[in-house]
Image (spheres, helix red, strand yellow):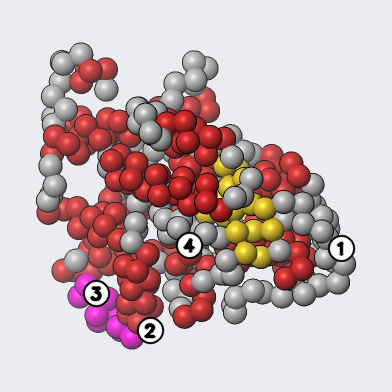
């Protein structure tokens, strides 16, 4: 990066471009760096320079371009999910077709293989525009303390819609009204990580405006990657005179759901929950948002839950946005290492708070036939509260 800045290396140099994209972008170096170098931001800027120099249309970018084009467009995301679900239930069950696809389009085969079972759509796509304590249908509902907005994410609402529903229920049970504005779009994290900073800025402006219109006092995120990037909107738009101040104000209101629950007071479940779990730190939660204690305190609040430590819990699982698609070999090695550590705990469930991590770890566990389930902390908490599921499971 310094050589490029000094003019000693061309930004379109193949070695430079390869190095910028080989980095997994986990930001663990930021946690380790005593000088506080913001490497994630530097990496995004370097990749943006690479993209600008290379131009569009590289033939080996099909999975990446497919995803980056679809994510800001909810209708395309929903259509893609429906097609993938249909594939999983028909051609995906035919071994000969899978082998044929792996030979002809290994990139597309990887994308399909990573995906968990896509849930049935229809009403699952939409949560109530607002959910409060009185809407839960439980006795002794508390009076709401205020209104928070929840960013539903683009991947989360397609692959794990129950996590959004569980988040809204848990927040409502803890005396918050929860708004899910229709105006929210993809946070732009994947675009920024792939050097598409202008696309990310466009999505940031849409999300800022939607949050301002909601009247909420805080924006709660249940996806580590999204939350970390939402907190960086101020830096993303710092050179935009119209949006800089609004972006900074917006970022100051973003909080991870576990941090919000712990800070504002968490209602303890009453029923003992006798299972063994382990917790894996999503990179963008522990290194990006610097949140490590809150998820563990949430788990500690569930009576009867045995939480066993996970070796290398702060190591990347290899998902890293779409790194597991663009660099399957190193991502696969990271995923295998993570799964080995999880299996060694003897846990029945692994808890983690990011959809990319949930996808990567689930795929690794499926590959070895492990029965260990992957679950978001709010989903475990909803079950411990014995709240009826808002969406069918």
Image location of residue 162, percent across then percent down: 57, 68
C-alpha distance separating marks 1 and 4: 35 Å
Badges 1 and 2: C-beta atoms under 8 Å apart?
Answer: no
Magenta span: 89-101
C-alpha distance separating marks 2 and 3: 16 Å
Residue 89, disc:
2
Q: Which residue is drawn at 26% across and 57% down?
A: 69
C-alpha distance separating marks 4 and 2: 30 Å
Image location of residue 80, percent across then percent down: 32, 71
Looking at the rendered structure, the secondary structure element under dot 1 is loop
Image location of residue 89, percent across then percent down: 38, 84
Q: Mark 1 points at which residue?
A: 270
Quadrant location of the N terminus in the rendered image: top left
C-alpha distance separating marks 1 and 2: 40 Å
Which is more foreground, mark 1 or mark 2? Answer: 1
Image location of residue 95, percent across then percent down: 30, 81
Residue 317 vs residue 69, the one in the foreground: 69
Q: Name the residue under label 4.
A: 182
Is 52 left or right of 216, judged from the image as shown?
left
C-alpha distance separating marks 1 and 3: 50 Å
Is 236 left or right of 56, judged from the image as shown?
right
Residue 99, disc:
3
Q: Which residue is drawn at 33% across and 73% down?
A: 79
């Amino acid at each position: 990066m310094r050589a490029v800045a000094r003019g000693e290396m061309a930004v379109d140099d193949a070695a430079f471009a390869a190095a910028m994209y080989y980095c997994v972008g986990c930001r663990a170096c930021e946690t380790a760096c005593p000088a506080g170098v913001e490497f994630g931001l530097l990496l995004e800027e370097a990749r943006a320079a690479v993209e600008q120099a290379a131009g569009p249309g590289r033939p080996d970018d099909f999975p990446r371009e497919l995803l980056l084009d679809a994510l800001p467009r909810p209708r395309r995301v929903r259509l893609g999910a429906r097609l993938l679900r249909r594939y999983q239930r028909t051609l995906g069950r035919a071994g000969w077709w899978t082998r044929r696809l792996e030979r002809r389009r290994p990139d597309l085969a990887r994308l399909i293989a990573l995906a968990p079972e896509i849930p049935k759509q229809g009403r699952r796509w939409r949560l109530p525009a607002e959910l409060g304590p009185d809407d839960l249908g439980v006795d002794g509902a508390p009076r709401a303390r205020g209104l928070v907005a929840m960013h539903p994410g683009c991947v989360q609402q397609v692959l794990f819609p129950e996590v959004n529903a569980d988040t809204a229920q848990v927040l409502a049970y803890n005396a918050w009204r929860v708004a899910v504005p229709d105006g929210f779009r993809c946070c732009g994290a994947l675009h920024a990580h792939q050097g598409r900073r202008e696309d990310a800025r466009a999505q940031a402006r849409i999300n800022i405006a939607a949050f301002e219109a909601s009247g909420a006092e805080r924006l709660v995120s249940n996806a580590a990657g999204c939350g970390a990037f939402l907190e960086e909107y101020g830096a993303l738009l710092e050179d935009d005179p119209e949006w800089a101040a609004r972006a900074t104000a917006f970022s100051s209101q973003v909080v991870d759901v576990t941090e919000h629950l712990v800070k504002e007071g968490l209602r303890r479940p009453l029923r003992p929950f006798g299972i063994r779990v382990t917790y894996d730190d999503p990179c963008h939660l522990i290194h990006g948002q610097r949140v490590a204690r809150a998820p563990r305190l949430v788990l500690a609040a569930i009576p009867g839950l045995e939480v066993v430590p996970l070796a290398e819990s702060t190591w990347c699982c290899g998902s890293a946005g779409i790194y597991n698609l663009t660099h399957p070999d190193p991502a696969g090695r990271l995923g295998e290492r993570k799964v080995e550590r999880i299996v060694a705990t003897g846990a029945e469930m692994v808890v983690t708070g990011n959809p990319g991590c949930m996808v990567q770890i689930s795929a690794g566990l499926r590959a070895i036939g492990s029965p260990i389930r992957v679950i978001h902390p709010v989903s475990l908490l909803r079950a411990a509260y014995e709240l009826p599921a808002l969406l069918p499971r």
